[in-house]
Image (tube, helix red, strand yellow):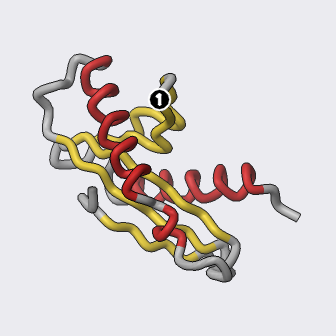
Amino acid sequence: MVTKIELGKNGESLIADYLIKKGYEILARNWRIKGGEIDLIALAPNGVIVFVEVKSRSSQAFGHPLEAITPEKQSRLIRLSLAWLLENKKWNHPYRIDCAAVLMSSPPEIDYRAGVI
């Protein structure tokens, strides 16, 4: 039995690999500050900094994984993204927030959505 933590880490690794294959550079994984965590931070081939929230599920028994991204979570992601930009002196840099759902079926299913927040 896979734990929720292992499920989440596996999903994040799948999305990181997905982005790398598309030419992205992973800048950080599980970046944390007091206010929360960003799963992945990447640099897109076009130079945009991309903050990625990854939601992984073993099934859709409790709904689609992206349904777990509530308005409160969206606000937190915006605040965290801005904090990262400030901390890394990139406050004037173009950025976007993406969301990715991973269903751990065989093979895993990825639903990646760019610029949703």
Q: Position of residue 63 (x, y in %)?
A: 57, 79
Residue 58 higher or lower than 93, as above or below? below
Residue 65 higher or lower than 18, as above or below? below
Residue 44 higher or lower than 117, as above or below? above
Q: Quadrant of residue 112?
A: bottom left
- Residue for badge 1: 35
Figure quadrant of the C terminus: bottom left
Who is closer to the viewer here, 50 or 106? 50
Residue found at x 51% / y 64%: 68
Residue 99 higher or lower than 107, as above or below? above
Q: Is residue 32 left or right of residue 83?
A: right
Residue found at x 47% / y 68%: 66
Tell me the amino acid under the disc marked 1.
Answer: Gly
Residue found at x 33% / y 27%: 84
Q: Position of residue 109 (x, y in %)?
A: 54, 77
Considering every residue shown, the one lying at the far left of the view is 92
Who is closer to the viewer here, 58 or 69? 69
